[in-house]
Amino acid sequence: MDFESYDVLVVGGGLAGIRAAIAAVDANPRLSIAMVSKVYPMRSHTVSAEGGAAAVLRPEDSYETHAFDTIKGSDYLADQDVVEAFVREAPIEIIQMEHWGCPWSRDSDGKISARPFGGMTTWRTAFAADKTGFHMLHTVFQTSLQFDQIHRHDEAFATKLLIEDSRCVGVVAIDMRTGRFEAITAKSVILATGGLGRVYAFSTNGNICTGDGMALAYRAGVGLKDMEMVQFHPTGLPYTGILITEAVRGEGGYLLNKDGERFLKRYVPNKMELGPRDIISRAMTTEFEEGRGFDGPHGKYMHLDVRHLGEEVIDRKLPFMRELGREFVGIDIVKDPIPVRPVQHYMMGGVDADISGATPIVGLYAAGECANVGLNGGNRLGSNSLSECLVFGAAAGRAAAEHASATRAVGANPVDALLADETRRIEASFLDKKGGDERIGTIREEMQHDMDAGAGVFRTREGLEKLTRQLGSLRDRFEKIKIEDSSRTFNTELTAALELDFMLEVAETIAYSALAREESRGAHARRDFPDRDDAKWLKHTLAFRDDGPAPRLEYGDVRITNFKPQARTY
Amino acid sequence: MAEKRITIRTTRFDPDKDKAPRLQSYDIPFADESMVVLDALNHIKAHVDGSLSYRWSCRMGICGSCGMMVNGIPKLTCNAFLRDYWPRSITVEPLSNFPIVRDLVIDMEDFMHKLKSIKPWIIRKQEYPLGAGEHRQTMDQIDEFRQFSECINCMLCYAACPVYGLNNEFLGPAATALARRYNLDSRDQGIKERLPVIADAEGVWECSFVGECSVVCPKGVDPAKAIQQTKLDTTMRFVLPYGNRDE
């Protein structure tokens, strides 16, 4: 068997992955870079980010306040040295994006504009209208096309990390077009596969957000950090889960209950609509439970009202929101309030990685949503994640390039054997599997509904224990799935099965990590343990794959530098 | 009342065993007024026939994956509502003018090459140092190119373009619009490098100005305008001794 060999391999073609690839080229232009993505890069879920990217770019702002806002927002679970480095790098990255052509919205003097965002004490969110992720992704992707060192493997689905002699030396991937199994080797591998929102039924995330990179790393023995920390965004459209950007509130929109009341005055009186996402999602859920939500055909909802902003501001700052309202709800947000309710949106947890993206496995790095470098802790502030993709994508790209420049390539022998093993595994478990009567779609839907019910905005021990049992039983049933599609050409039933396999794995780490953390911190709200408990729980959860159904949980220290944990009120 | 249902006919084609594409019919529940064609395909794949293949992701009209022919018209299936067709049946086919890989999946490698050929990145004679901060750019200057930057590469315009249907050497609507997006950006100085690609025989001159590309664009981009403006640009550069800002 033959295989393709590179210096650096990036899995994932979203903002973090492409930024990493360009950084690797910049660090050493002689390196060859492979980018393996299960979709064409411009389809990556970065494209759906709307509101903006945070960075200190204005004279009245400071690194210290951005750091403090982020750390307080994280409910003190962020690693403070990582946050402090992040806030210094973010402005440089925003300027770099500007030089690459990102159409940032501008102030009247022609400088990059900023808007207010939840949990940020000042205007520091740079934006491109309300399609910031779309513009950043297309800008960075199109920019990457000029680098012949970057070799794309579009629509190639990574199934396994190649680990040889305790170092990561590449991946096995299925070329979706031909169905061929390929070993793609490299001296450094960067995981940048994005989030896992599709383990939930109601999520803003696209179909491709299935936790692939997290599961790949987990199976290779890397810990998944703080997986109980799942972000629920306050404003998703009922039924579809389409994201209505926080920028709607940043620009002055109101959240109203069915009595027409700005109910956030009872929860975040000093911040109101610009409170952090975890607290606002809990406030909305509480209002629903107390009977102050609207009832609709797709469940309870609140009104998000921008009518007072006027058509001109809406068309200038929020044109995509108007388009989404018109096309998907049949309303004009200039004249009608928008129905919204909390929706799974983002994963703070992820592959355990350090400030340069390095994981405990030599040669393996992670960046973006699939990674947990310690930036977001218990709750990410809106607009920090696009900046995170840039800052830590670039850091991982540089570190991976440095490692590759100083390392010799892996030989053919172990790779051939590893590829043969992985090919056999997938053929036996899926492609050539006979019998089986469980539908992939049914197991997936049950998992999603169980996750919504058991690991949502509020959690309890009973609910989480039930969830672990449900996931265990779904895992057993997954062994009995039937695959109707035997084709080698663009077999999306096979990829759906592989994705479900990944999702069941990461869903279990969420359930068990959440069950163990007996406190409420950030997005992890336990009804049976309503208070934060710094004495016992100011620590990171690390979930490792174990022989049994449950992961082995370990705990690590949170690095505190300049900001002592204090009560988190807004 | 009996459960509301709708008939979806979709293209099936597996090159491993089929000689030609065929249509297969599925009768599925039309359970919710908010259902779109993509939801119907997802229902089929999850509950009826797991082997149906198509691309999709964001289901909010921004990733550009789920373009297909819906009753003969190129559309994003994530915002083509069943209620606009019911009680008629809906025929879903792969985008026209492209080779079919499988079922509803088209081969769009041709576009990926064309995208790269127009050099869709900022070209400057001298790189502006990062330390110098951002280029100043006014909202008016952004408005010059804004609409062309909204292209989501969904390929609906190529599926609607009769010229591309006859000659796929034609650079086509989206790639021309994206070239225009950079040529009109006040930060860019690369028009001279792009014009040879977009002004050659298979570039803008092939367009017969049917304008279907602009009609089907789900994002309000007007590629037909980009093509006409580029024709003008190209002519002016040959005729006039002075030119654009890059000289």
Image (spheres, coloured by chain):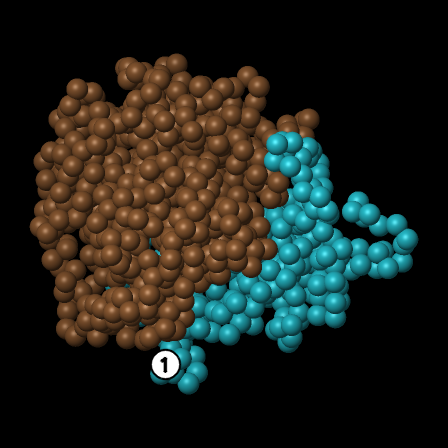
Chain colours: A brown, B cyan
Secondary structure beneath dot 1 equals loop
Q: Residue at x 41, y 70 (%)?
A: A177
Is residue A119 shown to the viewer in this render? no
As rendered, which of A363 and B164 lies closer to the eye? A363
Q: Nearer the viewer, residue A273 or B63?
A: B63
Pick the quarter of the image with the N terminus of chain A: bottom left
Residue B32, position in %: x, y? 33, 52
Left or right of residue B115: residue B192: right
**Above or below for A265 versus B101:** above
Q: Nearer the viewer, residue A153 or A519?
A: A153
State left or right for residue A510 relative to residue A403: left
Q: Examine the image and state in which quarter residue A258 appears.
A: top left
Residue type for callout 1:
Asp
Percent x, y of residue A568: 30, 17
Depicted B59 relative to depicted A485: above or below: above
Q: Which quadrant would residue B198 be assigned to in this image?
A: bottom right
Characterize the local packing of mark 1: few (<14), some (14-19) or many (20 or more) Cα atoms within 10 angstroms: few
Q: Closer to the camera, A104 or A70? A: A70
Residue at x-position 9% and y-position 50%: A548
Q: Which residue: 13% across, 59% down?
A: A477
Q: Quadrant of the C terminus of chain A?
A: top left
Query: Residue A137 location, x and y as percent?
Result: 51, 47
Left or right position of A7 against A416: right
Name the residue carrying label 1.
Answer: B16
Q: Which residue is at a point 29% across and 26% down the rendered structure image? A: A559
Q: Chain of mark 1?
A: B
Q: Is residue A76 visible?
A: yes
| Total labels drawn | 1
